[in-house]
Image (spheres, rainbow, N blue to C red):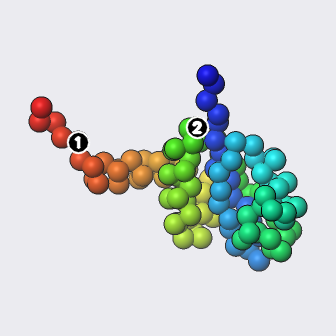
Amino acid sequence: MKKRQWFLYIIRCNNGRLYTGITTDGKRRFEEHKKGDKRSAKYLRGKGPLEMVMIKKIGERGLALKIEAKVKKLPKIKKEMLIEGKITVREIMKNLNAKLNKKRPINYSA
């Protein structure tokens, strides 16, 4: 069975705010958000015109969810740096892995 590829995306609203999400189909999801119907995020309704400013391939859904949560907590300046390519998703993943390892240290005693 082929695993679906998940993507992290960031949309800029007309007021300059940034919305972060994940999807398996960026074009479809962006169209849903632009329409503003029941499938769109409530946050984005009435905040158009919307602009997809970033979409990055992540991989598996679980990892995409973790990275999405991490990016949503970033200050706007860091999100802008991610959009501009000044920091990478890989760097965010490294920070996430470092924090996970601190929370659940590996026990080598067998």
Percent across and percent down for residue 27 are 81, 47
Which residue is farthest top?
Answer: 1
Percent across and percent down for residue 86 are 58, 56
Which residue is farthest bottom?
Answer: 15
Going 18% across and 40% down the picture, which residue do you hit?
A: 107
Does residue 83 lie above or below 64 as drawn?
A: below
Going 64% across and 34% down the picture, which residue do you hit?
A: 4
Foreground residue, 40 or 77?
A: 40
Circle on res. 59:
2
Q: Are marks 1 and 2 in contact (CB under 8 Å)?
A: no
Does residue 49 lie above or below 90 as drawn?
A: below
Foreground residue, 49 or 79?
A: 49
Circle on res. 28:
none
Q: Is residue 56 toward the left or the right of residue 91 in the image? A: right
Q: Residues within 10 Å of mark 2 (few under 14, many from 20)?
A: some
Does residue 97 lie above or below 83 as drawn?
A: above
Going 11% across and 36% down the picture, which residue do you hit?
A: 109
Tag 1's secondary structure? Answer: loop
Going 16% across and 36% down the picture, which residue do you hit?
A: 108
Percent across and percent down for residue 90 are 51, 45
Circle on res. 106:
1
Q: Is residue 40 toward the left or the right of residue 69 in the image? A: right
Q: Quadrant of residue 25?
A: top right
Residue 83 seen in the figure = no
Amino acid identity at mark 2: Gly
Q: Considering the image in quadrants, where does the C terminus appear?
A: top left
Disc on the earlier residue, 1 or 2? 2
Q: Quadrant of residue 59?
A: top right
Amino acid identity at mark 1: Ile
